[in-house]
Image (cartoon, rainbow, N blue to C red):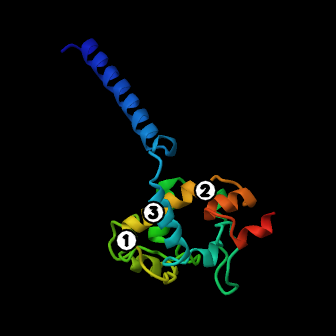
Amino acid sequence: MNSLQARRYLSTAAIAAVIAGAAFAWSASPRAQAAPDPQDVAEGMTIYRTKADCQTCHGWAADGRKMDTQMPDAPSLRISRLGRAGIIYAIKCGRPGRGMPAFDRQAYKDPARCNGTTLADLQKNGQSLTDPPATLQPREIEMIADFLFDKVIGKGPMDHAKCVEYWGEDVDACKEFK
């Protein structure tokens, strides 16, 4: 192969790599994802409200209006700019030193879980972990993400119609939005 052929080959390979990368990025984007199973969304909401008790800090509507004055302030998830991978990472690994617990039982024990960071690394940097109310299985974390992206993230501030859609019926909590 002469140098002209080699350059053409490399150019073609580079173009193919760019196209393949763009195709992967598109397929990994939230718009390209299949709609979540409604049963997973409902289960994710239940886990959010009960087992993980996310509502204590983030509020039942995930709008940052916490339910307990003793709990740390948490951001509104309704205006989160995190993508699905970022939300899953935050649930798995928490936010050391900021009150967000790591819900993955192996977070910071298995270096592969949280970007190679271990509990010893956190302690060396003076960061602490908040204990979660319960640990979650990977599938449960996925279901919380399904719930958040289907009902919360990017849905704007809560209003009466969104409240009814959120709960599936006109519950007492929706009265404040009438």
Task: Read off the residue under disc 2.
Answer: 153
Measuring from the top left, give residue 174's x and y in whole percent: 73, 67
Is label 2 in contact with label 1 (beta carbons under 8 Å)?
no
Residue occupying image coordinates x 37% and y 66%:
138
| Residue furthest front as drawn | 169
Q: Residues within 10 Å of mark 3 (few under 14, many from 20)?
A: many
- Of the pair 59 and 159, the residue shown nearer to us: 159
Residue 143: give its label.
3
Evaluate whether residue 66 shows in this view: yes
Q: Nearer the viewer, mark 3 or mark 2?
A: 3
* Residue 75 appears left or right of 135: right
Q: Is the N terminus in the top left, top right, bottom left or bottom right quadrant?
A: top left
Please, is residue 112 above or below residue 120 in the view?
A: above
Please, is residue 133 above or below residue 93 in the view?
A: below
* Residue 92 appears left or right of 3: right
Q: Nearer the viewer, mark 3 or mark 1?
A: 3
Secondary structure category for the residue under label 1: loop
Residue 137: give its label.
1
Q: Residues within 10 Å of mark 2 (few under 14, many from 20)?
A: many
User: Mark 2 is on which residue type?
Assistant: Ile
Residue occupying image coordinates x 34% and y 70%:
111
Of callouts 3 and 1, which one flags the residue occurring earlier in the amino acid sequence? 1
Residue occupying image coordinates x 30% and y 18%:
7
User: Mark 1 is on which residue type?
Assistant: Gln
